[in-house]
Amino acid sequence: MLDNGFPLATESNILKELIKPPTILRTMVNTITGSTNVGEQLPTGQLSVVPWRRTGVKYTNNEAYFDVVEEIDAIIDKSGSTITAEIQGVIDACVKLTGMPDLTLSFMNPRLLDDVSFHPCVRFKRWEAERILSFIPPDGNFRLLSYHVSSQNLVAIPVYVKHNITFREGSSQGRFDLTLGPKQTMGKAVESVLVSSQLPRGVLNANLNPSQGTYTFDPVTKMLSWDVGKINPQKLPSLKGTMSLQAGASKPDENPTINIQFKIQQMAISGLKVNRLDMYGEKYKPFKGIKYMTKAGKFQVRT
């Protein structure tokens, strides 16, 4: 990248060679010797055709790990229908391979990927022609690509909510009834579930009974939080009870929305699957691993 005629390096691995990341030991040495974290010479990769990779890389354990992480944003209406749903996905890599390996990564269903943004190491022509990722990887951690899936019919919703939140006119009591369950998760567990809801201003207190986990209600901010944990499909978690309202206050204009956070390990909700990872240009056999994870972004259920 050129800025006002000056060449700039934006690759984090190269920048770490230029300016060493601070450590306690390095700080102590610098204090004693008066030196700095700035490297003495230009990074080796800068002068090669692959400026993102330093030369002469050596490892005793050669390994390449890829994490497919998807974040689902969704708005679900009162009846359980999906109003909007989209997936933001990334593939993060940790590659520690000796020499100058050339990797190819192929997918079972690459057509799912839309609006894709690549690391500079990816050969774009090959992707356009064959939908295969071909690249000489940087050394260490980097983001290989980020993508977007937005077609309504492609986005599966991994949790459902049964809710009954009612306020009666002239009554100082409201009813709160909420049950969560998994769906379309291919048998994978929904974990780290956290439900939060901003209750109406007229609610003074909430007397609820969770079937699992713990809940808190802040009477000042009116924020209800329920830490569910892991959903057991055989015994669905529920939160039921009553809400105390201000005496004489009119019925709230609208029902609260419910925000949900969750994680699902070993599953990409878009259905994206890596087919195979091959290495060329080097003789050794590396360790290879692919991990999938789905988590909630802005996931909102209207009641």
Image: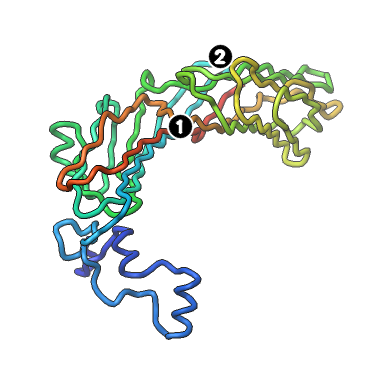
Q: Quadrant of the N terminus?
A: bottom left
Question: Does residue 226 appear to the left or right of 91 in the view shown?
Answer: right
| Residue denoted by label 2 | 79
Q: Is 73 drawn above or below residue 37 in the view shown?
A: above
Seen at 43% across and 28% down, the residue is 267
Q: Is 299 drawn above or below residue 136 in the view shown?
A: above
Q: Position of residue 58 (x, y in %)?
A: 26, 58
Name the foreground residue: 195 vs 59.
59
Q: CA distance from mark 1 to mark 2?
A: 24 Å
Q: Which mark is residue 294?
A: 1
Question: Does residue 202 appear to the left or right of 13 in the view shown?
Answer: right
Seen at 72% across and 18% down, the residue is 166
Dividing the picture into quarters, in which one does residue 195 lie? top right
Q: Is 302 drawn above or below residue 133 in the view shown?
A: above
Label 1, residues with CA under 10 Å away: few <14, some 14-19, many ≥20: many
Q: Secondary structure at mark 1?
A: strand
Seen at 36% across and 36% down, the residue is 290
Identity of the amino acid at label 1?
Thr
Identity of the amino acid at label 2?
Ser
Q: Which mark is residue 40?
A: none
